[in-house]
Amino acid sequence: MTIADPRLSETGEGEARYRARWSWDSVTWGTHCVDCYPGNCPYRVYVRDGRVVREEPAGSFATVEDGVPDFNPMGCNKGACWSRQLYDGDRLLHPLRRVGERGSGKWERISWDEACSEIADTMLDVIEEGAPEDIAKEGTPEVATVLPTTRFFGVFGGRQLDLHASFNDFSIGLHETFGKFCPVSSGDDWFKSELVLIWHMNPAFTRIPLYHFINEARYHGAKVVSISPDLNASHMHADLHVPMPSGDDVPFALAMVQVILEEGIADWTFIREQTDLPMLVRTDNERYLRQTDVDGPAEGVREDQLYHWDPEDGLIRADRGTMHLEGRQVALEGSYAVTLHDGTEVEVEPVLARLRRMLDAVYTPEKQQAITGVHPDVVRSIARKAATRRTNIMLGWNSCKYYHGDLIERAMCLLLGVTGNWGKFGTGIRSWTAGSMDGHGLAMMKGRPGMEATDAIIGMRDAAIEMVKENDPSVTSEELAARELAWLSQAEGGGPMGAAGRGRGGVQAFWWYWHAGYAERWNTPGWGDDSLPRGFDEYFKEALDEDWWEGVAAPGPDHPPKMLIECGGNMLRRTRGGKTALLENLWPKLRMIVSIDFRINSTGLLSDILLPAAQHYEKLGFHIPTPHQMMMTFSDKAAEPAGEAKPEWEIFRLILEKFSERAAARGIESYQSRAGTEYIPAKLPGRYTMKGYFADEEVVADEQVRDAALVGVLPEDTTLDTMREKGHVRLTGWGMSLMGLSQASPFEHNRTHTPFRNHVEKGDPFPTYARRAQFYIDHPWWLEAGEELPVYKPNPNSGGNQPLRMTSGHNRWSIHSMNQANPVILQTHRGEPVVEVSVEDARQRGVEDDDLIRVWNDLASFRCRAKVAPGVMPGQIISYNGWDPHQYVDWMGANELEAGMVKWIAFAGGYGHITYTPAEWQPVPTDRGVPCDFEKLG
């Protein structure tokens, strides 16, 4: 029986159109190789008449572990209509040159030859007047863009800023605790959790492809608790919601720790072995008891050798090579007398004794209620569950964006530490990681093509690892040795920041301080931590005087940047307070701003040259491989780039060829960097393409895959052809990268992944100063701030003393800003920027739903629509991340209210893991809990 569809005309034209949607000429594998972390959703991409017409989730993942749900189908609303942006109105199709003043909105179309000539000549002008380091890039995490951009800058000697500060997904409290910020479990491991704490995360928005694992864990018996100021989309699937005022999480977390310790339900063996809580602290100076105190200065005496107290043997050294105690019951309480090398006697006590005194005095369930409003019974109930269940904190990148986010995260980790909840399936806490990308890096490091060159690099690296272990017998794991190598190499201009070791690195905080106008903001009284005995600049100067940032405190004040090349980034949207700071202070210094993208974003609108980049489906690419899925996912070239767009690899090759040509015409045979490295323009195109071998993106991709297989992160028979056939392949190892090794777990092919198993099962030390999960930091700055243990400090008034606090989060409708103009997505929400406000705050200000409002603080103001939402906590405003500033009136976006404060403590160094390494320890800007107010506009 056939049922007529009234939408189809009698002539059959409607049916023909409908059938045409299901016809195609070719189908390829695709994914979206942007920073939609963790992403890696394999799609099938359909092409007709040379144009991509649609895509659909492949649903092709196999089951990993029997009894555990698989990853299928993997996809989201953005991916389901990504192809609409290939041919939509905001697509950049041709090179453009600015006409009139920056921001005039007037452009003229130019040829690729004209564009590359102007860029090359400006580069040469800047180099002749100063040095190649005066040409800078900020960057992007997108793999397809990172590699050609990094190689390009490394080849000519440009300045490559450490991009982690610019987008700030650096979980600083995790780094302070574990010596690394990047533990990540696989999504299917969530299924094994028994208590899920959704805390500073909204996975219904931000983990759409993986969210089903949380629900399936709940069906399997897990309890799910949502902790947030607002009732967000993840709340509806939770068993309990704990309303938490913005940034006030620490008293709640510490009160749970107090309950667990007071009731004696802690995991005492775990505490003794995995944490620094048994380590001895001197009561006279609040510093760890060190071997230099006990034995004095002598050969073989270590400043970082700490101590336990054994009830039978007395003072014993805490083993730096293993955390296992083999049954020793080292003391967790009490005070003891120790004779120092000079004959004086001091009193020492375990860290836990100090912690318990603090908790009992300040952080009981009853006392925390005055700050958080959470009832003591709720605190005790969740604490008891955490102590008796496999507990999994679903942490997003919200906490790290608070001024005191490090204290929030340290308190969370402490809860896990006293309950034994890491290194076991279904437990832990997470941030992000991009491990197992060895093939991408190795292909770029080689001086010649082929696997022999790869083998040579691997051999040199392995020899260096063994040398580090031989020099220090306490370095007992590959992870520890690799970190030692990273700390040694960072002194050379930021370590591996430059391709082929010739680019110059830079930490972005110094760029902002010296060149973008943030020094005044960071020193504004009341906007930072006013409880400190010194001002911001005093700490800043001390950090420089101590040479903690030697080689990467750049570009310095005497060498302002002269040219900016943005490729895949959007500096004016991403930077906190971007327009109000950068346009006034940085933009006038820049002779040329080049924006390379597939669309014209807010930074592009205020640039000088726009270059059209190929979109996904129009070039070869790989997503960021991550332990979330344990997959390498491939995106093929399904169609030719629209208009005159080109892949980034080709764009930079063309610029370098023109750079070489124009240098010859101008008689420039060579030039030097400020570090003394010589560059010969005539040779740079050949270095970039490895003498033509890397001229074709197919060859580049194949080399990356083969190198990855050689190092062991992909199956040994993997090539570009097999990736093209299967679309994705399960990883086979962690490889050599720090982020991969930081997982510190065995790589098992038929089991879910949880990090830190090596720490728990094998006793491998953490890469911290104490070689344990470190909750007591006795660096002088932490002691001076009263933050040696995690404590509560309220949000500062960064931006003025206003009655409301603006929070944010990654939105549901766009990967950052790149999908905000997608015509399909625009139909699924209000289609313009909004802020969510509470019913009570709206009533007090006479605001109704969809009214136009002005939101302001002492820095700036912006205008948008109000979404009056009953789930918003009074006193809170929510402005979800992702709207481009040019989508607001006067191009003033919500980020203009953000002062971009950095917590001064992150400028510290010289203390074990409190040392800069690329994409890790460094100052990062904050943008949560922003003081503000709003009013109705006429």
Image: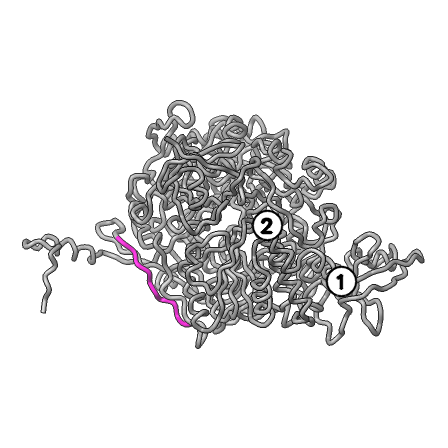
Residue 304 part of the magenta-drawn span:
no
Residue linked to disc 2: 405
Label count reads 2
Q: For this view, does 790 lie left or right of residue 57?
A: right
Q: Where is the N terminus found, in terms of image quarters?
A: bottom left
**Image spot of residue 340 (x, y percent):** 89, 58
What numbered label is drawn on residue 770? none
Is disc 2 in contact with disc 1, using a CB cutoff of under 8 Å?
no
Considering depth in this image, is 312 or 532 the residue closer to the camera? 532
Tag 1: Cα neighbours inside 10 Å, few (<14), some, or many (≥20)? some
Local SS, label 1: helix
Identify which amino acid the numbered label 2 is placed on: Gly
Residue linked to disc 1: 353
Residue 432 visible somewhere in the drawing: no
Identify which amino acid the numbered label 1 is placed on: Ala
Tag 2: Cα neighbours inside 10 Å, few (<14), some, or many (≥20)? many
Residue drawn at 86 percent across, 59 percent down: 347
Magenta segment: 54-63
Quarter of the image holding residue 232?
A: bottom left
Q: Closer to the observer: label 2 or label 1?
A: 1
Considering depth in this image, is 458 or 567 the residue closer to the camera? 567
Q: Is residue 785 above or below residue 662?
A: below
**Image spot of residue 537 (x, y percent):** 68, 35
What is the C-alpha distance between the residues marked 2 and 1? 25 Å
Q: Is residue 676 above or below residue 235?
A: above
Q: Is residue 714 above or below residue 292?
A: below
**Image spot of residue 477 (x, y percent):** 66, 65
Q: Where is the C terminus found, in terms of image quarters?
A: top left
Q: For this view, does 146 lie left or right of residue 316?
A: left
Residue drawn at 57 percent across, 47 percent down: 402
Quarter of the image holding residue 181?
A: bottom right
Residue drawn at 67 percent across, 42 percent down: 549
